[in-house]
């Protein structure tokens, strides 16, 4: 195109502080094909965009370069502005002179020279861009939600209430996630079961929600709007359509010794069990390793006792394929198991706290189970070692969090709040008990959060010590907690009956493999990468895949629920249209030039290229060629690089455009 | 062996199994044998076989002028035969629609070509008919890439100077491309101008980019028949470049081109376990 | 009376020429068995004996494989052109073969008819050609069949004739030649040896008759099937002069470059519409022979071939011109069939 | 100054008109007034146009030789150079060298009826001859123009076709291939040869210029000979690939001629001596 | 014959190396963005060319970068396993393993070509890589050998 407009943004002073924007504008006016070149303080603002649209009309521009921030930030904004003025959006390119220039180079002369180069490259590229129109792709208006915790439940309910079918897949035998295991929740101390169970029941009975519990996502194929998800429904050995939930089987089961995962090992359960009373579906599942009938073929009492004949020892895993248009990942978190042995070398664990060796050193979720009414001790706080009521309890914050040396460097955000909650629960249960909390900083930034912590300290007499605990040893039934109180300026030694560690919040197990199946990025800790931390927190770089809740980063229940509704909102936006429009920047093959070596067919990660034949009207084979399926191609461009004769081309990054960019640096 | 060859070829033509024999002829004793296309049984006497039959005839299998002659029988040495395996893997030829006559060979060329010193394919593989006997024992990579290893003992600057002298003589006659059985593209990237990826004029800059492109397009494909080195009128030792990419494929992925028709080609496929030590 | 010169004197002269800035081109070793014409740095790179002829031609010194035609600079909408720097150093081609030197007068025609090619003419005027008469030849040489010979004087300014023991007879034909050997020659009666030259196998008259009538003959297809379509024959031929004009751009400046091209390349004649009149290789081989033995002679009166044999010497598949012309001759002889025509045909060959 | 025959003149782009979806016509003038003054050409000649950074391409000069202040050329976007030329705007600079090749023998055609047959993108080489003939109207007899294209959108210089129709003793016939017409198409429907036959022009002492794809020329010849034209009265312009334009680079060599020197305009009689190698 | 006496060495202090970086859009480009948002300063010698994936980065582009005067070339993309297109970087890894051997044989200075994996979270690593390459290239000086090859206009 030969009528190019270059618009240079000051970005307030983010750019203009280190890039001489006026001198830059002068230089760029001489670039071949540039018709107008101007600067403005906030190009992405309303007046900024109006200035652009005015120039498009006035100068009859057929190409545009905006020199401002990263394309990931505002490319869509400027493309929309151009489109509103009749200029094809794909004739708009951006030069990143903020993140890649003014923010990182403080020598004005060098930064301005670099900005000029970046603009010259962008102009060279845009002159060879083609006017493109989005590709229209049919849409399956069904959603898949992975993870049945509070976030997954909320997302599923929102989407289902909007009238779309939802497939909810939960790994555990029942939905409810970590929240189901809590006793009360901060800052209102309302009972976790009471506020969650109605939503779980709603999920169980919702006509639009198809619930797969005790199931995993095996494989995901296809692309936005047309995913084909294979779900592995693990063998439950109980036919939930027949079972009435009467409980005869789990009462009859002789093996009551298996440690209950739901109680994090604090309590025991039988081989055939329902994780907790309010489970949805309230149907038992047989633990294949614990059931002697399945392992050694002896017993089968539960089957005898079952009036409905719902138990079937021959049950097999089942693979089910579901067609969905969008996927919401809500796989939640787990607390870091901080014993000595760790899965990778960098994490050294906290052997010095004796977790795993001293029975009375437990983590916060285990404490939640002990004080929970549906817990193993029926709500009475009893020490796991001897069942005595602990008179002195020590809560330790930041165990493994905010620790670059041997733990996670991030703050797990909710520990300060639930530690305060735990001191209150402890006070209400053991009136003459004394709670101690070791902390570094109290982080209570939510609504009524700080007031809640003040109440724990002032009314419930919790003793807060600002300092870290160095070591915990066990001497004659007492846990000697040695720490320091930096405000008092002297070491502190407490003889405690029970120690509760607020360990780091980490993503649930297996989230990396799931992310790879979904082509979603994740960071070094395994938290899923959102598309943009501020502007697109619930979207991911894989079109049609959304994230919410703790799988994306440590957060509390209100935030998880808010994110779940946000993700559901995004899905509903997608489903509001009859079809999906896809980015047209996909590959195509010049079938006259293709030598049919099919290297591209092998290389394509999406199997989007097929072997085709060109025949004349009489059906005689003229030649073979490779052919791209526009619906599947995601535009990675690997086929272009492996094609020897360069018959493959990728719109948006064509060979002419990329070579023009490199050559403009000459 | 020549008589045996004549007998086999006459039978093939008379039986109508093939319409053309792609072989070597030598009309005028003074000049080395050259490719011939025998279409009638009487002409079979024109076929010769001696240690001067250096050309790799498989380059004709992808030519439209030769395909027009009908179903071919082709005479190949051990090194040439490997090109058929690669062409088959890249779906350029229909292996079932040709008869491959493999000639046992103990080295060709006067003086003996460099490739024959480390040849482990004296008896051609994956052929339909084999004529003559020879013993081919495996050659360890050390010896196979000896020429390259010797060359690589020079320093980077010495090598750069060497190639600047060599590639300056290249006049871009593209004999190296036209003679190579694996250069079968409809229109070579060198002949495309949207965009011009490297200069088509024989400037040193254009020659460097051209020979890099040609050699890299043979990565994991070059069978080492060295026709390009023989055909180059400027006497550029292209063998070193081919050995370089061949050795790289063998060291990194244990892959040698043209040995196993089922093997997954190197370029275009990958393994998550590929080892490398240069990516920081 | 003849004039002779010692080999060492010659070598010193070559070093002197190089010393005072003249460019000297001559045959020299490339690798350990290939001999090519190259610009020389020192006279000991020169190779005078024991080989028929180099594999390339002296065309390289007058019509190089690539040369700059003019420069341009782009600034916004404005463009500046500037002339390419033409060479001004004297050039001496030393120890060329007569069949190379003979190509220069032939090329003068095409580069000077109607429009004058300043680049070729400039190099031509700066060049002095000293040829070395052939002692022997190989199976590819056929200069005698196209009007040449081991001591053909066409295009040479001076010619050396080997006398043995590193002594040469020198005959100067032009003022340039005389000027070059000014004061270096000694009087003598000895006359240099000349090789017999290849036995005349081709008769161009019969060939031209065939060409006049048999454009569509199946002979073309039969004889040239093995041609793989590279440019080796054209680029090493002393008389092939086709070229391409391309654009070399770096940043906002660039140069228009002329570089060798060949009618053997598949894309040589492709139309903008995609139609290619010569889409098959036999058609391109036919064009090369027509242009050399029918078209150029009818337009400029000179056969565009000096019989050096490079085309078959470098051809990877042993083709080149001689096999095709021999086949044409056999076809004509066969077509003449019985009786006098055949007699006459053979007799003409024996001259 | 040593004459570098390959160096182009710099030309200022005066006007760019988009004729069809992929065809543009460009009006250019010499930047150097001296060259502008001394420059002249004859209709039918071609020039070689430079897009600096991409290369050169050959196009006919489609403006009449009588227009002194600019020359015009027309091109379709097919390759690298034409893609670069597609982007030029008023005020840009491109290169031009020429004029090259022979021309239409307008002097010989004086006093005779003129029949111009054009197909597709072939209108520009004919347009210059038509304007020249109309500017010397009295020297020529009846002028007939039959111009066809695949669809109505492919017709080039449509405005000028109307203008030509105003002139006396001039018949302009436009046609599109069957299926290429639009509902409000007033012209003929069919291929040029059939339309010509249908028009049944009585050609007294006529001369024809036929330019278009090879298939159109092949089918038009019998129609013209039925109308009584001898082979020496039928002319065409060959579309060979050209590079130097000065008879050196060998690209346009076809049989005994260099098309860029002895052509591109040939009578059918002359074409008889050429092998079918074009 | 290119007369190969090298250019007189420009004095080292004023030499500013020119570095061309081909980066993948999903990881390294965002890593560079992150370095920006964290204001991690690094030398301004690098010019980033954004491509959808390392799988799209053609070997010719490295040669073309040197042809246009680059003194060092960086190719960077997602860590194996993180590729937004699942396997683009695996193809790239295999391609560079072979291509480096060819360039080494041709005498190209291998420590002027750098390959790295930089994820969207590694802003600091981007800063370190660019600073390191710039310093190293500054010490090596301009790539005279390739500039000599490219002396055209």
Image (cartoon, helix red, strand yellow):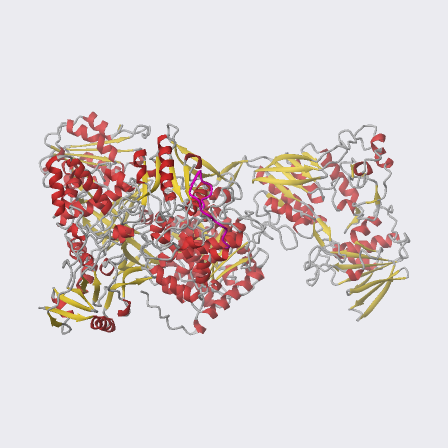
Magenta-span inclusion, residue B136 = yes
Magenta stretch bounds: B123-140
Q: Quadrant of residue C195?
A: bottom left
Question: Which residue occupies 64% across, 47% down?
Answer: A513
Q: Position of residue A462 (x, y in %)?
A: 83, 59
Q: Residue at x 42, y 58 (%)?
A: E65
x, y (%) of residue A591? Answer: 40, 39
C240 lies above or below D272: below
Q: In the shown orientation, is residue A13 left or right of residue A162?
A: left
- Please say whether residue C201 is one of the residues in the magenta stretch: no
* Residue A136: x %, y % from top left: 50, 37
Residue D46 screen position, x and y as percent: 21, 46
The residue nearer to you, when weighing A636 against E106, is E106
Q: What is the tally of numbered marks visible in this picture?
A: 0
| Depth check, front residue: A297 or A156 | A297
In the picture, the quarter occupied by the N terminus of chain D is: bottom left
The residue closer to the viewer here, C64 or A617, is C64
Q: Is residue E19 visible?
A: no
Q: Is residue A634 left or right of residue C4?
A: right
Query: Secondary structure of the magenta portion, mostly?
Result: loop
Quadrant of the image for the C terminus of chain D? top left
Position above or below: A83 against B20: below
- Along the line of sight, which residue is nearer the eye, D51 or A131? D51
- The answer to whether one can see residue B188 in this image is yes
In the depicted structure, whether residue A241 falls above or below residue B52: above
């Amino acid at each position: 195109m030969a009528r190019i407009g270059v618009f240079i943004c000051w970005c307030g002073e983010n750019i203009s502080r280190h890039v001489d924007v006026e001198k830059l504008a002068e230089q760029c006016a001489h670039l071949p094909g540039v018709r107008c070149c101007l600067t403005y303080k906030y190009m992405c603002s309303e007046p900024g965009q109006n200035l652009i649209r005015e120039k498009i009309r006035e100068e009859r521009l057929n190409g545009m370069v905006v020199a401002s921030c990263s394309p990931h930030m505002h490319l869509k904004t400027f493309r929309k502005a151009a489109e509103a003025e009749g200029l094809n959006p794909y004739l708009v390119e951006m030069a990143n002179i903020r993140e890649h220039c003014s923010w990182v180079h403080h020598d004005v002369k060098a930064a301005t020279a670099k900005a000029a180069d970046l603009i010259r490259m962008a102009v060279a590229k845009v002159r060879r861009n083609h006017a493109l129109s989005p590709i229209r792709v049919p849409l399956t208006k069904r959603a898949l939600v992975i993870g049945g915790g509070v976030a997954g439940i909320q997302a599923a309910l929102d989407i289902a209430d909007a009238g779309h079918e939802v497939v909810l897949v939960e790994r555990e035998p029942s939905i409810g996630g970590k929240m189901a295991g809590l006793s009360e929740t901060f800052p209102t101390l309302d009972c976790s079961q009471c506020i969650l169970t109605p939503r779980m029941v709603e999920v169980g009975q919702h006509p639009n929600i198809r619930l797969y519990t005790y199931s995993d996502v095996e494989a995901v194929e296809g692309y936005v709007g047309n995913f084909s998800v294979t779900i592995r429904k693990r063998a439950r050995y109980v036919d939930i359509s027949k079972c009435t939930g009467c409980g005869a089987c789990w009462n009859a089961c002789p093996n009551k010794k298996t440690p209950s995962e739901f109680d994090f090992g604090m309590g025991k359960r039988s081989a055939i069990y329902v994780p907790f009373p309010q489970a949805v579906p309230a149907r038992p599942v047989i633990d294949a390793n614990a059931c002697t009938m399945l392992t050694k073929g002896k017993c089968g009492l539960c089957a005898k006792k079952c009036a409905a004949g719902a138990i079937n020892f021959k049950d097999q895993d089942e693979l089910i394929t579901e067609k969905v248009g969008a996927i919401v990942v809500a796989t939640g978190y787990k607390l870091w198991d901080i014993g000595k042995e760790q899965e990778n070398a960098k994490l050294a664990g906290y052997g010095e706290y004796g977790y795993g060796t001293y029975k009375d050193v437990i983590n916060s979720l285990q404490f939640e189970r002990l004080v929970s009414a549906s817990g193993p001790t029926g709500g009475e706080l009893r020490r796991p070692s001897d069942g005595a009521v602990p008179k002195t309890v020590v809560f330790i914050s930041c165990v493994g969090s905010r620790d670059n040396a041997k733990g996670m460097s991030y703050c797990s955000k909710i520990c300060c709040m639930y530690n305060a909650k735990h001191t209150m629960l402890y006070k209400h249960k053991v009136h003459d008990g004394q709670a101690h909390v070791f902390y570094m900083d109290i982080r209570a930034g939510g609504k009524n959060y700080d007031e809640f912590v003040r109440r724990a300290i002032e009314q419930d007499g919790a003793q807060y010590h600002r300092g870290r605990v160095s070591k915990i040893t066990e001497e004659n039934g007492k846990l000697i907690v040695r720490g320091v109180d930096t405000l008092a300026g002297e070491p502190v030694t407490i003889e405690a009956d029970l120690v509760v560690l607020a360990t780091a919040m980490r993503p649930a197990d297996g989230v990396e493999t799931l992310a790879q199946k979904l082509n979603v990025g994740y960071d070094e800790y395994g938290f899923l990468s959102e598309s943009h931390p501020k502007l697109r927190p619930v979207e991911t770089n894989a079109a049609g895949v959304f994230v919410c809740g703790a799988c994306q980063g440590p957060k509390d229940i209100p935030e998880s629920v808010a994110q779940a509704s946000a993700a559901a909102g995004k899905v509903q936006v997608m489903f509001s249209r009859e079809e999906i429009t896809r980015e047209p920047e996909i590959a195509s093959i010049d079938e006259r030039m293709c030598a049919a070596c099919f290297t591209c067919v092998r290389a394509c990660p999406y199997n989007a290229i097929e072997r085709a034949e060109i025949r004349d009207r009489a059906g005689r084979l003229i030649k073979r060629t490779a052919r791209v399926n526009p619906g599947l191609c995601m535009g990675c461009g690997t086929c272009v690089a492996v094609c020897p004769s360069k018959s493959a081309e990728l719109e948006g990054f064509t060979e002419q455009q990329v070579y023009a960019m490199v050559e403009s640096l000459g | 062996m020549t008589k045996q060859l004549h007998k086999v070829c006459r039978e093939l033509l008379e039986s109508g199994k093939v319409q053309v024999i792609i072989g070597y002829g030598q009309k005028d004793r003074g000049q080395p044998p050259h490719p011939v296309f025998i279409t009638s049984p009487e002409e079979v006497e024109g076929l010769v076989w001696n240690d001067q039959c250096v050309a790799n005839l498989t380059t004709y299998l992808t030519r439209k002028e030769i395909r027009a002659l009908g179903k071919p029988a082709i005479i190949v040495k051990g090194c040439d035969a490997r090109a058929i395996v690669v062409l088959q893997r890249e779906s350029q030829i229909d292996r079932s629609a040709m008869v491959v006559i493999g000639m046992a060979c103990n080295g060709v060329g006067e003086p003996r070509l460099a490739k024959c010193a480390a040849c482990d394919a004296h008896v051609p593989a994956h052929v339909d008919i084999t004529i003559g006997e020879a013993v081919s024992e495996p050659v360890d990579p050390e010896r196979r890439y000896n020429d390259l290893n010797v060359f690589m003992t020079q320093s980077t600057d010495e090598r750069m100077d060497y190639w600047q002298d060599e590639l300056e003589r290249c006049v871009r006659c593209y004999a190296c491309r036209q003679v190579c059985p694996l250069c079968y593209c409809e229109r070579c990237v060198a002949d495309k101008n949207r965009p011009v990826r490297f200069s088509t004029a024989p400037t040193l800059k254009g020659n460097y980019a051209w020979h890099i492109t040609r050699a890299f397009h043979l990565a994991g494909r070059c069978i080492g028949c060295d026709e390009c080195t023989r055909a180059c009128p400027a006497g550029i030792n292209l063998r070193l470049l081919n050995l370089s990419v061949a050795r790289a494929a063998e060291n990194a992925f244990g892959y040698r081109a043209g040995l196993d028709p089922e093997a997954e080609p190197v370029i275009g496929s990958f393994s998550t376990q590929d080892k490398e030590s240069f990516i920081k | 009376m003849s004039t002779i010169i010692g080999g060492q004197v010659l070598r010193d002269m070559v070093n002197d020429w190089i010393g005072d800035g003249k460019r000297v081109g001559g045959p020299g070793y490339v690798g350990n068995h290939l001999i090519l014409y190259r610009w020389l740095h020192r006279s000991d790179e020169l190779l005078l004996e024991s080989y028929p002829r180099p594999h390339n031609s002296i065309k390289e010194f007058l019509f190089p494989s690539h040369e700059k035609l003019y420069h341009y600079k782009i600034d916004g909408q404005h463009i500046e052109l500037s002339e390419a720097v033409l060479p001004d150093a004297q050039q001496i081609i030393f120890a060329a073969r007569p069949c190379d030197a003979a190509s220069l007068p032939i090329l003068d025609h095409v580069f000077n008819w109607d429009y004058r090619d300043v680049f070729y003419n400039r190099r031509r005027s700066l060049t002095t050609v000293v040829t070395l008469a052939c002692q022997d030849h190989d199976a590819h040489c056929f200069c005698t069949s196209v009007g040449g010979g081991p001591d053909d004087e066409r295009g040479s300014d001076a010619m050396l004739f080997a006398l043995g023991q590193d002594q040469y007879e020198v005959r100067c034909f032009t003022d340039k030649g005389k000027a070059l050997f000014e004061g270096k020659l000694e009087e003598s009666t000895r006359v240099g040896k000349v090789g017999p030259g290849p036995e005349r196998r081709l008769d161009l008259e019969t060939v031209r008759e065939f060409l006049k009538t048999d454009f569509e003959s199946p002979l073309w297809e039969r004889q040239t099937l093995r041609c793989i379509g590279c440019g080796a024959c054209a680029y090493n031929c002393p008389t092939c002069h086709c070229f391409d004009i391309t654009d070399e751009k770096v940043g906002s400046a660039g140069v228009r470059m002329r570089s060798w091209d060949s009618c053997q390349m598949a894309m040589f004649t492709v139309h903008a519409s995609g139609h290619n009149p010569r889409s098959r290789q036999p058609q391109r081989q036919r064009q090369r022979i027509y242009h050399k033995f029918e078209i150029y002679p009818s337009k400029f009166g000179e056969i565009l071939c000096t019989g050096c044999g490079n085309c078959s010497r470098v051809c990877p598949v042993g083709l080149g011109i001689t096999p095709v012309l021999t086949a044409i001759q056999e076809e004509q002889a066969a077509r003449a069939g019985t009786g006098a025509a055949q007699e006459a045909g053979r007799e003409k060959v024996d001259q | 100054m040593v004459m570098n025959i390959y160096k182009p003149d710099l030309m200022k782009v005066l006007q760019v008109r988009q004729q069809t979806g992929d065809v543009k016509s460009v009006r250019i003038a010499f930047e150097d007034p001296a060259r502008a003054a001394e420059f002249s050409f004859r209709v039918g000649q071609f020039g070689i146009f430079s897009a600096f950074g991409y290369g050169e391409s050959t196009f006919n000069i489609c403006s009449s030789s009588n227009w002194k202040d600019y020359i015009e050329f027309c091109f379709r976007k097919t390759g690298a150079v034409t893609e670069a030329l597609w982007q030029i705007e008023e005020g840009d600079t491109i290169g031009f060298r020429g004029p090259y090749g022979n021309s239409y023998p307008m002097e010989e055609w004086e006093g005779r009826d003129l029949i111009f047959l054009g197909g597709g993108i072939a209108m520009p080489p004919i347009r210059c001859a038509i304007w020249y003939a109309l500017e010397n109207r009295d020297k020529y007899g009846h002028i007939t123009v039959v111009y066809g294209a695949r669809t109505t959108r492919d017709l080039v210089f449509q405005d000028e076709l109307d203008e030509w129709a105003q002139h006396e003793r001039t018949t302009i016939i436009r046609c599109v291939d069957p299926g290429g017409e639009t509902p409000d198409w007033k012209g003929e429907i069919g291929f040029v040869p059939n339309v010509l036959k249908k028009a049944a022009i009585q050609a007294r002492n006529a001369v024809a210029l036929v330019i278009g794809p090879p298939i159109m020329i092949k089918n038009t010849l019998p129609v013209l000979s039925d109308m009584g034209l001898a082979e020496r009265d039928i002319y065409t312009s060959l579309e060979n690939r050209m590079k130097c334009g000065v008879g050196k680079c060998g690209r346009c060599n076809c049989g005994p001629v260099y098309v860029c020197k002895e052509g591109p305009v040939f009578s059918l009689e002359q074409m008889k001596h050429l092998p079918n190698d074009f | 014959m290119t007369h190969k006496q090298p250019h007189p060495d420009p004095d080292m202090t004023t030499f500013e190396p020119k570095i061309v970086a081909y980066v993948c859009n999903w990881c390294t480009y965002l890593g560079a963005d992150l370095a920006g948002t964290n204001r991690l300063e690094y030398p301004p010698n690098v010019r980033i060319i954004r491509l959808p994936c390392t799988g799209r980065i053609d070997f010719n582009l490295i040669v073309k970068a040197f042809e246009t005067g680059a003194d060092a070339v960086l190719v960077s993309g997602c860590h194996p396993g993180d590729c937004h297109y699942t396997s683009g970087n695996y193809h790239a890894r295999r391609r560079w393993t072979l291509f480096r051997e060819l360039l080494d044989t041709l005498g190209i200075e291998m420590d002027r070509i750098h390959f790295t994996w930089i994820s969207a979270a590694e802003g600091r690593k981007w800063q370190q890589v660019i600073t390191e390459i710039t310093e190293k290239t500054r010490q090596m000086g301009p790539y005279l050998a390739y500039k000599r090859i490219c002396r055209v206009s």
